[in-house]
Amino acid sequence: MFRKRSYSLAVIGILLGSIILLMLFGSRLFTDIEEDPQVEEEKRIVVGVSQLGSESGWRTANTESVQNAFTTQNGYFLIFNNARQKQENQLKAIRSFISQRVDYIIFSPVVETGWETVLQEAKEAGIPVILMDRNVDVEDESLYVTCVGSDFTAEGEKAGHWLEQELRRRGYAGNDVNIVILMGTEGSSSQIGRTAGFASVAAEHKNWNILDQEFADFTSTRGREVMRGFLRKYPDIDVVVSQNDDMTFGAIEAIRESGRTVGVDGDIVILSFDALRSALEMVAAGDINVDIECNPNQGEYLLRVIDMLEAGGQVERRYYVEEDVFTIENVTQELLRERTY
Ligand code: AHR
């Protein structure tokens, strides 16, 4: 009995002692763990991102993906600049990143040419440059570390192969097929690659007449405008290849205005690129026949690349994001629900 009581007294004593110790040192302990903004800021990796613009739904999703990846919680300080489709703005942004001595430069080049001098300046300043989405055409490949983005030529080929199969399925394989192409920004990797990829498949089919192809800048307004022009010039268009969803939205409006119909049961077959949720809804409704995906979620890939570089590792010259092809057969309600852009 007596022994039991002395045990309990000892336990209570230990508990009280621990509480007093915690009160004395606990607050100090927590202050040490808490983020000291000054010190933490110094430890953050500074990344300058030059985004080429905000021309499309795809671009908005791409920007969000980068902004969600390079957060302070992940240890980054992001300096973001939107070049509004102007190469001169991108050149200015990159030079300002160099003078701010950022740790990394990420940029999505609006066109492929004209970057040697500024990339040389970044190299001399010892700042690694990572390309996002689009590529640059430079002789000296050491001017950038790696490129994260899509295989645009493969996307163009996928569009061509889908059309081959569709014509075969409809029993039109040998008939004349009149095609018009709405191209994206002149000189951009996505325009160059998709045009070349589709052309390589078209070259195998003597009955595919490419009536016309025109730049429509990846925007809905220009897509509508250029399509109206095509419809005035060519009364017998069978197929529209539109190099992004925004141009497709405009083109479909123009086709409907002209009294013609689109899609699975329509007069004109529509091939599009990007696979935004609003476009996939049109695929599910049968208004767009096929949508070749272009994946804007590149932030996570870029994070991994910088992690590898920070760890002193080697990175590949090229990272391709995963992409699919969507038709009425595989656009499910679940896919639409999960699509965040
Ligand atoms: O470079 C990617 C392309 O640029 C996307 O297909 C288009 O929507 C964007 O503007």
Image (cartoon, grey):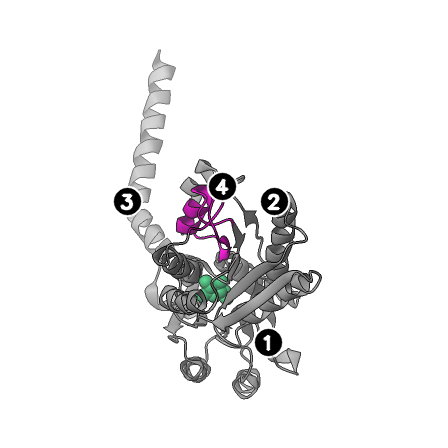
Q: Secondary structure beneath disc 3? A: helix
Element on which disc 2 rests = helix
What is the spatial separation of the Cα atoms under label 2 and label 3, in whole angstroms? 80 Å
- 36 or 232, which lies in front? 232
Q: Is mark 4 within 8 Å of ligand 1?
A: no
Q: Is mark 3 within 8 Å of ligand 1?
A: no
Kind of residue sitting beneath label 1: Tyr
Q: Which residue is mark 3?
A: 23
How far separated are the C-alphas under marks 3 and 1?
A: 54 Å
Q: Amino acid at mark 3?
A: Met
Q: Position of residue 160 (x, y in %)?
A: 62, 57
Residue 31 visible from this viewpoint: yes
Q: Residues within 10 Å of mark 4 (few under 14, many from 20)?
A: some
Task: Mark 3 vs mark 1: give the one in front.
Answer: 1
Q: Is residue 14 above or below residue 48?
A: above
Q: CA distance from mark 1 to mark 4?
A: 37 Å
Q: Earlier in the sequence, mark 2 or mark 3?
A: 3
Label number found at residue 170: 2
Q: Is residue 337 magenta?
A: no
Q: Is residue 90 above or below residue 161?
A: below
Badge 3 or badge 1: first in the primary sequence: 3
